[in-house]
Image (spheres, rainbow, N blue to C red):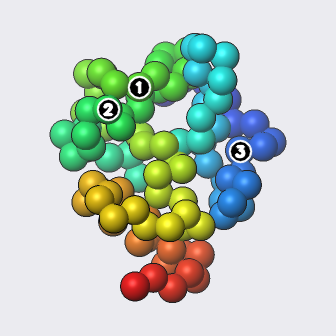
Amino acid sequence: MGGNHTTPDAACPDCGNVQDHRPLRSGGWIRLEPEPQLPTAAVPEQHRWFITADGYAVDGHGSDPNCYIAHYRVCSRRPHPEHMHPVFTAIWLRNCARDGIPFD
């Protein structure tokens, strides 16, 4: 993996949990769900994130067998979208349980 680019503001402003805060080549930053890395085949292509050798987060295509997902999709403080991909639902439910947030 590339260098650790986690910054002091790596905690999600909504749930407070520390995320893997990675720079984007475009100059922005993204919070990635740190654990677990997911099998690439289980995540829809448009939602896959990979870490380059120099520590940047890049979306879309990658040859790694595992990938990351954006934290904002599975943050326990966000409402559960009706049509969420099953892998996101499972992680959102895990995050809700971890944070003691009831869900229906």
Q: Is residue 88 left or right of residue 51?
A: left
- Where in the figure is residue 28, as x and y percent of width and height? 66, 23
Q: Nearer the viewer, residue 64 or 73?
A: 73
Mark 2 burial class by Cα count in 10 Å: few <14, some 14-19, many 20+:
few
Residue 29: mark in rendering:
none
Q: Residue at x 41, y 52 (%)?
A: 36
Query: Circle 2 is placed at which residue position?
Result: 46
- Do the residues under discs 2 and 1 have CB atoms within 8 angstroms? yes
Q: CA gap, disc 2 to disc 3?
A: 23 Å
Quarter residue 88 falls in = bottom left
Query: Circle 3 is placed at which residue position?
Result: 10
Q: CA gap, disc 2 to disc 1?
A: 7 Å
Query: Circle 1 is placed at which residue position?
Result: 59
Q: CA gap, disc 3 to disc 1?
A: 19 Å
Q: Residue at x 32, y 32 (%)?
A: 46
- Where in the figure is residue 40, as x and y percent of width and height? 25, 38
Q: Mark 2 or 1 closer to N-term?
A: 2
Quarter residue 14 falls in = bottom right
Quarter residue 48 falls in = top left
Q: Nearer the viewer, residue 88 or 5?
A: 88
Q: Is residue 10 left or right of residue 66?
A: right
Per the image, label 2 sits on a secondary structure element best described as helix
Residue 56 seen anywhere in this rendered image of the structure: yes
- Where in the figure is residue 82, as x and y percent of width and height? 33, 65
